[in-house]
Amino acid sequence: MEKENKALQTKNAKTFLTEYKPQSMMQRLDHVRSVPDIFRAKTPSLARLKKEYGERLPVDYLMLWILAINDMVNVGNKMTAFQIEYTAKLIYKENPLLTIADIKFVFDKAVSGAFGELYNRIDSAMICTWFRKHWSERLDIGEQVSQEQHEATVDKGGERSYDAEKVKMREAKKQYLQSKTKEK
């Protein structure tokens, strides 16, 4: 039974990778141009991909995106297969809550130069830095959006309703900052 489940999971993972390949998602998520757009896109997170398709899929999926950007930019020093896989593992390990829309948004910003010049190279440190900057910005904006939503729920009697999304964003930001402190 377990063998059959793994075979089905592998088949479903291959279908997912075909349907959600970076080239398709660049078009389907063309409307994602800001962090609030990411929230509205409601694409699955890497953690959800792991849960639904198995341990390997989030890393494989990130590798497809890194391969796409490696091909997209005109730099002399491209990443090797080993670097691509290692970078994908690092990104997933640091941010399993990244969504497909997050990934697309980060690479759009990178290609457009929003994270700075590439200076004829692309590497693991550079890509990981893009995702760290994005995640920090995403948490800040998420907290602001959540605060605005919370304030909009204040009833006429002056009592505030419970805003679970704000609590989640605050917790995610706290965990992220704690993990960065531990690394130093």
Image: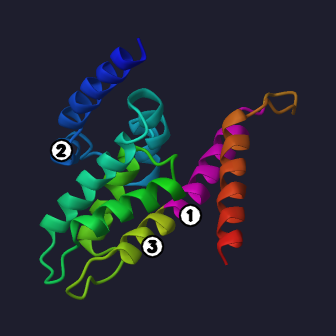
Image height of 120 relative to 129, above or below: below
| SS label for mark 2 | helix
Which residue lies under the disc numbered 1? 136
- Indicate the amino acid at tag 3: Thr
Q: CA distance from mark 3 to mark 2?
A: 25 Å
Question: Going 29% across and 64% down the picture, which residue do you hit?
Answer: 84
Residue that mark 3 sits on: 129
Q: Relative to residue 66, is residue 5 drawn left or right? A: right
Q: Position of residue 157 (x, y in %)?
A: 87, 27
> How far from the left and from the top, in percent, is residue 27?
18, 44
Q: Residue at x 69, y 47 (%)?
A: 147
Residue 128 image-quadrant placement: bottom left
From what the image shows, is residue 7 above or below residue 78?
above
Considering every residue shown, the one lying at the far top of the view is: 1
- Percent x, y of residue 72: 14, 66
Task: Assess whether mark 2 and mark 3 are in contact (beta carbons under 8 angstroms).
Answer: no
Q: Label 3's element?
A: helix
Q: Residues within 10 Å of mark 2 (few under 14, many from 20)?
A: few
- In magenta, the rendered stretch is 135-154
Q: Position of residue 68 (x, y in %)?
A: 18, 58
Q: Secondary structure at mark 1?
A: helix
Disc marking residue 151: none
